[in-house]
Amino acid sequence: MPVDLNNERPLAWDSATLNADTKAMLDNLQPNILRAHVREHLSVLFVRFNNVAEGRAFLRHIATTRMKSARKHLEEVREFAARGRPGTPYVGIGISKAGYIDLGHSLDEVRKFGDKVFRDGMKRRIAEVNDPAVDQWDWVYQREIHAVILIGDAEPESVAALREEIVAELPESARLLGEETGQGMRNPAGDGIEHFGYVDGRSQPLFLKDEVEREPRKRWDPAFPLANVLVPDPLAPNPVRHHGSYFVFRKLEQNVRAFKEIERDLADDLGLTGADRDRAGAMLVGRFKDGTPLTSKAKAGGGPVANDFTYDADDGSKCPFSGHVRKTNPRSFGREVIMARRGQTYGERVDDPSDDSPPEDRPSGDVGLLFMAFNSSLISQFEFTQQTWANNPDFENPATGHDPVIGQGDRDIKVALPKVWGKPEVSLPQAQVAQTVTMKGGEYFFAPSLAYLRNL
Ligand code: HEM
């Protein structure tokens, strides 16, 4: 029976009754798509091939010697939980449209990829999402990238060693165009944070029964059908059994100093005092630094980071409609838009991102987020989120403003913000906060099935 991507019930991946096609799907799917792989340390390599036979041989070699399947990854996670046995490193591959052509595929074959945005590539989509001009991007992203190789693990040593080996295996004809290094950051509670200091990566679409069952889910259902991230791999030997996912990579630089100044000034403007000052930043993100959802609580704190909430009882007086997490997941509609985020922070810091140091001690560049996400459709998930939700000041309600974190484009309208949590009293209309996240480049890829890679 073909894999039912639209099944609303989360996948019981280790069930004895799993049908043969679903088993084959898991044996041929890359890890990190259905479930996040540990990638506390991450090396991201951008490659160009230039020779069909050598490019193919390289990918085939990496796939057969270094890459595990989604099922193997899930088994490793189970082993770790039961016996504390650490898993093996993650190696993932994404191929761009230009990469498929360079690997010898015809235009007709590439047209089998249903996603037009993937076939265009990121450089041709800047107008739609208000990205900076390509000549403003970091040099590596201005070039024609054929493939991305992700190497991730819990410790830096194994990632560095594997990176060395894979780079040494690149054929003469290929070029390593550039690379990024990601490194996780945690707050004192042990939760992963991004550079502005906020808990990140908490809200995810979950596809597997064991993951869903661990979540409180009275209000928000975290279970999503595989159709949110998987599509048949059109160039695989058997697309009924072999699946892949569209992968968006964007390097997003964060001006932490400017963001911290904005938090401070906003708290002053709204007359917030004492612990209530933290609400200024929470209004921008939609969660407090410790992850507490602003729609649920007026103050941070109170146990594990919650995700079982909606905005049904919030007219914008608790969490503004523009708050980053509200913009990017309104929760009462748009479930088909939700993608699997797999980002990682980059850049070294001398300050502690989770303390209360003043803005002047914060970095104003060279740190940020390697935004990565798996999609079944780039145009109706990543691009839709960026363009129709984040960049749109009238989304859900007129004149509520851009997403203050990731919104791109002129922030020319003025907005009013709640002065007291949950009360109708709002500020006078004021200029929107300045943009502090800058896109430095990226590309759209397809993460093919292992069956495709091993048969190259
Ligand atoms: C959630 C920060 C870029 C989409 C979050 C959260 C933080 C955050 C702190 C809350 C943690 C959570 O709920 O999991 C950032 C920063 C970014 C960035 C600092 C850039 C530097 C993006 C981009 C997109 C995006 C580019 C998509 C276009 C989302 C989504 C959620 C989220 C969908 C989960 C919302 C939910 O389900 O409640 N982000 N983010 N983020 N972000 Fe971002």
Image (tube, grey):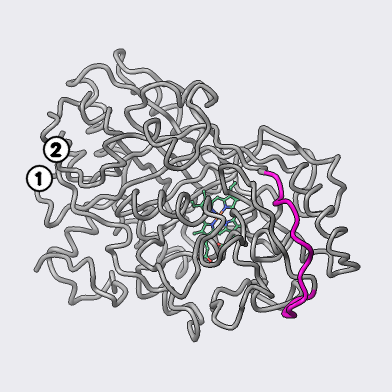
Q: Quadrant of ligand 1?
A: bottom right
> Looking at the picture, does residue 237 appear above or below residue 219?
above
Q: Is residue 432 magenta?
A: yes
Image-based side of 181 in relation to 47, left or right: right
Tag 2 secondary structure: loop
Name the residue at the top extreme: 172
Q: Amino acid at mark 1?
A: Pro
- The part of the chain drawn in magenta is 420-434
Q: Which residue is mark 1?
A: 237
> Looking at the picture, does residue 99 appear above or below residue 130?
above
Dominant secondary-structure state across the stretch colored magenta = loop
Tag 1 secondary structure: loop
Q: Quadrant of residue 241?
A: bottom left
Residue that appears at 45% across and 23% down: 142
The location of residue 270, given as percent across then percent down, is 83, 63
Camera-nearest residue between 380 and 243: 380
Q: Residues within 10 Å of mark 2 (few under 14, many from 20)?
A: some
> Looking at the picture, does residue 25 appear above or below residue 51?
below
